[in-house]
């Protein structure tokens, strides 16, 4: 495989471990704290996890540990890609080899389905050498198969036991780690000694707690998007004739959009959680943005940059109601809509079925967006919201509103979507170190038999020398949500907190950002140089942890 000069140099980077781990597994002992409770619905969660509920928080501290025999551990990459996944595997591999040179790592192919179907490769030092400090999940691939049925659990157990594995590490987000907790409970109920450990992954930043300050990949993705936004801001300031509407990945939470905005200071950033709290409709939002465009135009500034979270439309109450209505209607009237020859015919059918208020919302949308709402369905028959080009929607409706209000703004809009550009970027130094440490910690949790845990590292803003490695019982992260008529244990998604320090920072400055050009140009991720440049954390972490 041909590698770039950067890849070759980056391959030699040795991720930094916290001091307590630097002497190897033999110089670390596991220290357990008090029993834990779930964040909510403790009685229901306890009833669903009677064997793994209430376990104590774990912390690794200096102390001698007896050397053990070789361990065989499976590893699974689950869900969407995030920078640093390969380094979790590298940290796991190196720690297991330090525990015993005959330890083995089995990489299950294609995500959780590989575990169920017994498709794996043995990860060796030579194979892993080409993937250290790289982005992507291409070493073993990923997948979105849910582990939630007893039949799957039985197959997974058989695969692990047949190949001599005593544990599996699941690298994933909230859904993947929820499934891991269910698997750990099932193994225990069956009398199995198999250990299940998780690692917190998602660029969206919505898997975090006080003990897990951030998920891996968020740092790199946010910095990648911030570089691109900064480049566009420089272009906007140079050309002085375009409004750029930039959609940032993150469907359920606006962490990425907020973080990228804190790094670059655009003229406008929308935060879905704020819009939901205020009950702002699409029409109201359109007027607000059009007034900003008009105000800048009257100041001689026919340009600007706006950042939009991917999931915005699901937080606008009128559009949310429209989507729910369409999902229900098309579920009941599917054959009639399928038979309609074109979009015009489908829309004629809608006019007969939609209530006046919902119809008004639908037909106020640009034709292309209406087509996406009607044609793009997922396997369950629902609108695929992630495919709606929200950035184009906002750009078009703002243009129409400017005409309606008689604005003299010279409005020319350009749209962008930054998503996949960040999912497989080469990890920043922070993510390279963080993920390697998470993998190392996962190996120590396996060695200690701590099933139903997720690897954690705290005190992340104090510099690597102050990081504290440990493990959190997965049941501590749970609440109960009603899904498809059943109570389900779920790791609650962490949304942007409107009383949190990152949002307060935005609120304190956005009026000035809207009027002026206080743009910041972060530039590309740096891997060598001053620590304040190369090892810096996100603004979100800085503000949340002081």
Image (tube, rainbow, N blue to C red):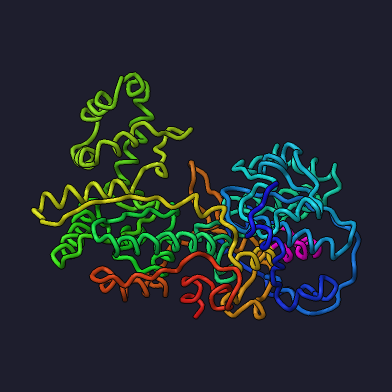
Residue at image point 32% right, 54% down: 245
Task: Point out residue 287 in the picture as x, y percentages from the top left corner.
Answer: 18, 56
Q: Quadrant of residue 87?
A: bottom right
Task: Point out residue 469 in the picture as x, y percentages from the top left corner.
Answer: 69, 72
Task: Point out residue 6 in the picture as x, y percentages from the top left corner.
Answer: 63, 60
Task: Point out residue 222 in the picture as x, y percentages from the top left corner.
Answer: 48, 62
Majority secondary structure in the magenta region = helix
Q: Quadrant of residue 466?
A: bottom right
Please give left or right for residue 269 compared with residue 176 in the image: left
Q: Nearer the viewer, residue 83 or 443?
A: 83
Q: Nearer the viewer, residue 333 or 285?
A: 285
Q: Is residue 274 within the magenta segment?
A: no
The tally of labels here is 0
Is residue 433 visible in the rendered structure shown here?
A: yes
Please give left or right for residue 485 compared with residue 511 in the image: right
Q: Quadrant of residue 10?
A: bottom right
543 to 525, vertically: above or below: below
Please give left or right for residue 343 compared with residue 356 in the image: right
Residue at image point 56% right, 48% down: 80
Residue at image point 66% right, 49% down: 77
Is residue 194 visible in the rendered structure shown here?
A: no
Residue most toward the left? 406
Q: Which residues are magenta?
A: 439-451
């Amino acid at each position: 495989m041909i590698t770039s000069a950067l890849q070759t140099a980056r391959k030699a980077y040795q991720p930094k471990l916290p001091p307590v781990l630097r002497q190897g597994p033999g110089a670390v002992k596991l220290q357990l704290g008090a029993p834990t409770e779930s964040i909510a619905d403790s009685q229901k969660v306890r009833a669903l996890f009677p064997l793994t509920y209430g376990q104590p928080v774990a912390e690794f501290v200096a102390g001698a540990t007896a050397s053990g025999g070789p361990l065989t551990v499976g590893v699974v990459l689950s869900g969407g890609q995030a920078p640093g996944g390969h380094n979790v595997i590298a940290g796991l591999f190196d720690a297991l080899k330090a525990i015993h040179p005959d330890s083995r790592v089995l990489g299950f192919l294609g995500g959780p389905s590989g575990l169920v179907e017994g498709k794996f490769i043995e990860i060796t030092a030579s194979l892993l050498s080409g993937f250290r400090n790289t982005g992507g999940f291409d070493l073993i691939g990923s997948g979105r198969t849910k582990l939630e049925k007893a039949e799957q659990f039985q197959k997974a157990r058989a695969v692990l036991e047949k190949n001599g594995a005593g544990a599996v590490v699941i690298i994933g987000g909230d859904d993947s780690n929820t499934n891991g907790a269910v698997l750990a409970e099932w193994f225990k109920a069956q009398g199995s000694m198999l250990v299940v450990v998780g690692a917190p992954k998602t660029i969206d930043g919505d898997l975090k707690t006080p003990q897990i300050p951030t998920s891996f990949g968020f740092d790199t993705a946010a910095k990648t998007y911030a570089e691109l936004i900064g480049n566009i801001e420089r272009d906007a300031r140079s050309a002085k004739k375009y409004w750029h509407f930039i959609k940032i990945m993150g469907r359920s939470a606006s962490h990425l959009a907020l973080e990228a905005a804190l790094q670059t200071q655009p003229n406008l950033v929308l935060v879905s959680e704020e819009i939901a709290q205020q009950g702002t409709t699409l029409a109201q939002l359109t007027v607000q943005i059009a007034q900003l465009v008009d105000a800048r135009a009257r100041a001689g500034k026919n340009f600007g940059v706006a950042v939009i979270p991917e999931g915005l439309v699901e937080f606008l109450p009128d559009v949310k109601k429209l989507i729910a209505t369409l999902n229900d209607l098309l579920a009941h009237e599917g054959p009639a809509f399928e038979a309609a020859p074109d979009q015009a015919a489908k829309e004629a059918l809608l006019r007969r079925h939609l209530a006046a208020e919902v119809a008004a919302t639908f037909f106020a949308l640009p034709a292309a967006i209406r087509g996406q709402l009607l044609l793009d369905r997922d396997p369950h028959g629902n609108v695929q919201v992630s495919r709606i080009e929200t950035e184009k929607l906002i750009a078009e409706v703002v243009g129409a509103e400017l005409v309606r209000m008689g604005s003299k703004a010279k409005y020319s809009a350009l749209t962008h979507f930054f998503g996949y550009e960040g999912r497989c970027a080469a990890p920043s130094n922070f993510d390279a170190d963080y993920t390697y440490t998470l993998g190392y910690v996962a190996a120590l949790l396996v060695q200690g038999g701590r099933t139903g845990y997720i690897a954690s590292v705290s005190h992340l803003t104090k510099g690597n020398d102050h990081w504290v490695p440990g493990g959190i019982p997965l049941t501590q992260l749970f609440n109960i949500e009603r899904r498809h008529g059943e109570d389900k244990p779920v790791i609650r998604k962490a949304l942007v907190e409107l009383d949190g320090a990152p949002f307060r920072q935005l609120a304190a400055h956005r009026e000035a950002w809207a009027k002026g050009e206080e743009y910041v140009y972060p530039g590309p991720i740096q891997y060598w140089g001053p620590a304040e440049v190369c090892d810096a954390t996100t603004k979100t972490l800085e503000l949340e942890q002081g």
